Image (cartoon, rainbow, N blue to C red):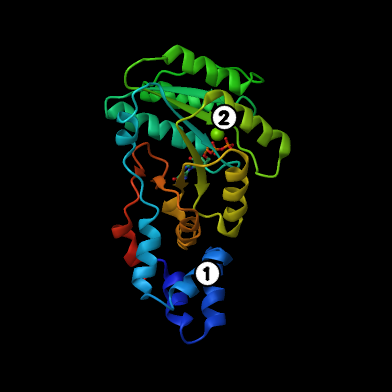
Amino acid sequence: MVFEGIKKAFSRLTEDKEEGRKLLLQAGVSLEVVQEIERELKEKPLREVVYERLKALTSPPLDSLISNKNAWPYTIIFFGVNGVGKTTAVAKVGKKLLDEGFKPLIVPADTYRAGAIEQLEAHAMKLNIPYLSSRYGADPASLAFEAKKKNAGKKLSVILIDTAGRVEIEKNLMDQMKKIVRVALPDLKVLVVDALTGNAIVKQVEGYEEAVGIDAFIVTKVDADTRGGVFLSLSKYKKPILFISKGQEYNSLDQFKPEDWVDSFV
Ligand SMILES: Nc1nc2c(ncn2[C@@H]2O[C@H](COP(=O)(O)OP(=O)(O)OP(=O)(O)O)[C@@H](O)[C@H]2O)c(=O)[nH]1
Ligand SMILES: [Mg+2]
């Protein structure tokens, strides 16, 4: 993948600052990151600036995070705005864990959107991953609690909690998210973001960070992204990308490797 817009922007930045800046914003790089990059370019060559930013997004592999934990179940919660790919990501991570010998349990804690429970159950059944039975209107925090109780002390167990899509400014829904996190006490809080989002990513990250805190990102729809700005925008937050998702297939979940990506940008 080559991000032409960003490449062009970087090559323009030295000759025509305004034009370069505009192109970076168009490529989905947040204004703050554009300004940070401009400052860094006074000190370091472009390739280094970009590589260091991408490197800051590297995550340890998921299995190492889980293995280091003495007390299972290791609990991962997935949240984010509507339609970004949370439910699909839960299924894909579940499959990865199952393939690696862990014992995932899927928790359909989106008890809000019509069809959400069946959607996740269908994935779980197809993949042979156990799931907690859920019903619409049920309290997501109670579901998470039940899942933890069920798996207390079970070796290699990992609980994957799917949650309803919610925009960071919806106060009631964000309060509910806080409650789920308070009760589930997740080991890993994952904000799922869509690579195509553009500048709205800033509000999403900052809204969720303020409400519940974020440990890592999953970036979805990378297969459909021709701009690449999302990676640079996320680099501001000093949090890792746990996975990138590159399609609808279950095995389209990859580790983010900065060395594979730097040539896409410079
Ligand atoms: N091309 C592409 N499509 C994806 C990817 N991940 C998810 N999708 C698609 O995006 C759509 C939404 O995915 P979901 O997993 O339902 O998203 P969600 O965040 O759970 O949505 P809500 O629960 O409604 O908030 C589906 O059609 C998925 O197949 C990806 O990496 N690439
Ligand atoms: Mg969903």
Q: Looking at the image, tell me whether mark 2 or mark 1 is earlier in sequence order.
A: 1
Farthest residue toward the bottom? 15
Q: Considering depth in this image, is 263 or 33 the residue closer to the camera?
A: 33
Ligand 2 quadrant assignment? top right
Q: Which mark is residue 172?
A: none
State the image coordinates of residue 187 (x, y, percent, origin top left). Answer: 45, 31
State the image coordinates of residue 208 (x, y, percent, origin top left). Answer: 59, 43
258 vs 196, left or right, is: left
Quarter assignment of residue 64: top left
104 vs 162, left or right, is: left
Which residue is painted at 34% across and 37% down in the image?
A: 62
In the rendered image, the quadrant that contains the C terminus is: bottom left
In the rendered image, the quadrant that contains the N terminus is: bottom left
How much space separates mark 2 and mark 1, taking CA atoms?
A: 33 Å
191 vs 1, left or right, is: right
Mark 1 sits on what residue? 34
Which residue is painted at 41% across and 66% down in the image?
A: 3
Mark 2 sits on what residue? 181
State the image coordinates of residue 97 (x, y, percent, origin top left). Answer: 33, 29
Residue 37 seen in render: yes
Looking at the image, residue 23 lies above or below residue 139: below
Residue type highlighted by circle 2: Val
| Cβ atoms at labels 2 and 1 below 8 Å apart | no
**Would you call the spot at circle 2 few (<14 residues within 10 Å), some (14-19), or many (20 or more)?**
many
Residue type highlighted by circle 1: Val
